[in-house]
């Protein structure tokens, strides 16, 4: 598959576009480095317990004076304490190492966890979760091989997760990165033990660097950047982490033909925020996001079909299923997603639809699961939340 990445700075914001087969597949936006949030996902702090609320199974910790965060009490079991007050799993006044796992949203404070994760390109080191896991997108044969070869790393402090990016990597390269993550982990705990409360032990990299760390390099043709400062930082990252791919990074400084004009990025963003999405053969999707879930309604629109023509309905639903999977990834929707496909009379056609829909969803790099058809005939999908959906990210920068 042909891939490209566009990184476009406009005013004080950075937009990242992932292209697959010349079609924009993902859109991410964030504040530029100088505007970047103080507290973001991945930052690691020495925090202090301010309050414990047993009836909701949570505590509130400060990572800075006046900056409270939500903490699940179950995380205390594996937390690394730099200062312990009492014998209970968690006490007011305890100081411990935490990592921001979810940024503040509207009225909700940030969420922190004691289960620290250090993420590399091929692997993730997980404090507290001691199992050795391998991405389900890697073949069963290779998964078993990884688990067998990594048994020497089994311990009672941390675990390892082999990421999808490792599927085309040499085992020696993955092993080298694991050793680097292990050294970083050991240094972090040693460093934390000597630091005072509210110290920031590690700051997450700029969002566009994280995006590049997560993108598949298989089939990558070029990474185009329109800002000189960002270009230099990305080159620095590639020289250190992926020198073999440095030649893919190019600075695009043609003011006559800017990236946005060449690839119609503004139009792509407008379409990705629109409620209605037209399908090729006249039907359309209506995508509505609520506080609790996302609802996607499939409509026949201009597509004229005879009543009882189940084959035509199936074709329309299959087209809608493919576009729905694309829109979920494009908009970075997460949580519970309900899709109301056009009703079908024949059970075999419904089975065909579900089979194809699972196939389209499986292409998403983020874990996305088609759960089942509800009693009301709605397809229920769940997608892991890794970062804010596009509509929230855009609303923040407006």
Image: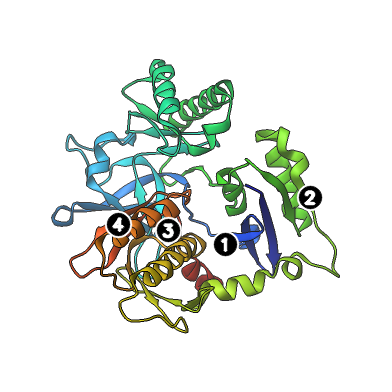
Residue situated in front as seen by the camera: 71 or 364:
364
CA–CA distance between discs 2 and 4? Answer: 46 Å
Label 1 environment density (alpha carbons within 10 Å; few <14, some 14–19, many ≥20): many
Label 4 environment density (alpha carbons within 10 Å; few <14, some 14–19, many ≥20): few
Q: Secondary structure at mark 2?
A: strand
Residue at left offset 27%, top offset 45%: 93
Q: Is residue 15 above or below residue 288?
A: above
CA–CA distance between discs 3 and 2? Answer: 32 Å
- Earlier residue among tags 2 and 4: 2
- Earlier residue among tags 1 and 3: 1
Q: Which mark is residue 211?
A: none
Disc 3 target residue: 103
Contact between marks 1 and 2 (CB within 8 A): the answer is no
User: Residue 375: percent from the left, percent from the top?
Assistant: 17, 66
Residue at left offset 79%, top offset 50%: 250
Q: Secondary structure at mark 3?
A: loop
Residue at left offset 40%, top offset 50%: 101
Disc 1 target residue: 27
Disc 2 target residue: 250
Residue situated in front as seen by the camera: 387 or 184:
387
Q: Secondary structure at mark 4?
A: helix
- Earlier residue among tags 3 and 2: 3
Query: Would residue 232 appear left or right of 162 to someone viewing this image?
Result: right
- Earlier residue among tags 1 and 2: 1
């Amino acid at each position: 598959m042909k891939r490209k990445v566009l990184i476009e700075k406009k005013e004080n914001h950075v937009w990242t576009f992932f292209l697959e087969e010349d079609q924009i597949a993902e859109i991410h936006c964030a504040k530029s480095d100088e505007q970047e949030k103080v507290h973001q996902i991945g930052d690691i702090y020495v925090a202090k317990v301010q309050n414990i609320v047993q009836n909701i199974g949570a505590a509130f910790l400060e990572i800075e004076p006046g900056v409270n965060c939500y903490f699940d009490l179950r995380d205390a079991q594996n937390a690394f304490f730099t200062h312990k007050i009492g014998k209970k799993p968690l006490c007011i006044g305890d100081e411990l190492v935490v990592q921001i796992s979810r940024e503040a949203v509207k009225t909700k404070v940030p969420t922190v966890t004691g289960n620290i994760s250090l993420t590399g390109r091929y692997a993730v080191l997980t404090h507290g979760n001691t199992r050795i896991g391998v991405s389900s997108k890697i073949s069963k044969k290779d998964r078993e091989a990884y688990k067998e070869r990594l048994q020497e790393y089994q311990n009672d402090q941390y675990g390892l997760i082999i990421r999808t990016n490792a599927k085309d990597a040499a085992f020696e390269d993955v092993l080298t990165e694991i050793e680097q993550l292990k050294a970083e982990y050991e240094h972090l705990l040693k460093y934390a033990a000597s630091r005072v409360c509210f110290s920031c032990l590690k700051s997450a990299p700029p969002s566009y660097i994280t995006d590049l760390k997560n993108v598949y390099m298989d089939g990558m043709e070029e990474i185009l950047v329109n800002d000189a400062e960002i270009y230099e930082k990305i080159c620095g990252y590639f020289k250190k982490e992926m020198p073999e791919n440095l030649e893919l990074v190019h600075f695009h400084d043609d003011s006559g033909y800017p990236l946005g004009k060449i690839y119609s990025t503004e139009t792509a963003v407008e379409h990705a925020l629109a409620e209605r999405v037209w399908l090729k053969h006249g039907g359309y999707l209506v995508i509505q996001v609520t506080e609790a879930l996302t609802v996607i309604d499939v409509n026949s629109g201009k597509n004229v079909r005879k009543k009882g023509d189940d084959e035509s309905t199936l074709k329309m639903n299959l087209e809608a299923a493919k576009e729905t999977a694309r829109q979920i990834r494009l908009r970075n929707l997460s949580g519970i997603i309900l899709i109301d496909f056009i009703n079908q009379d024949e059970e075999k056609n419904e089975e065909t639809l579900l089979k194809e829909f699972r196939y389209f969803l499986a292409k998403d790099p983020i874990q996305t699961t088609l759960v089942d058809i509800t009693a009301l005939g709605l397809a229920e999908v769940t997608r892991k939340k890794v970062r804010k959906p596009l509509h929230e990210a855009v609303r923040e920068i407006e």
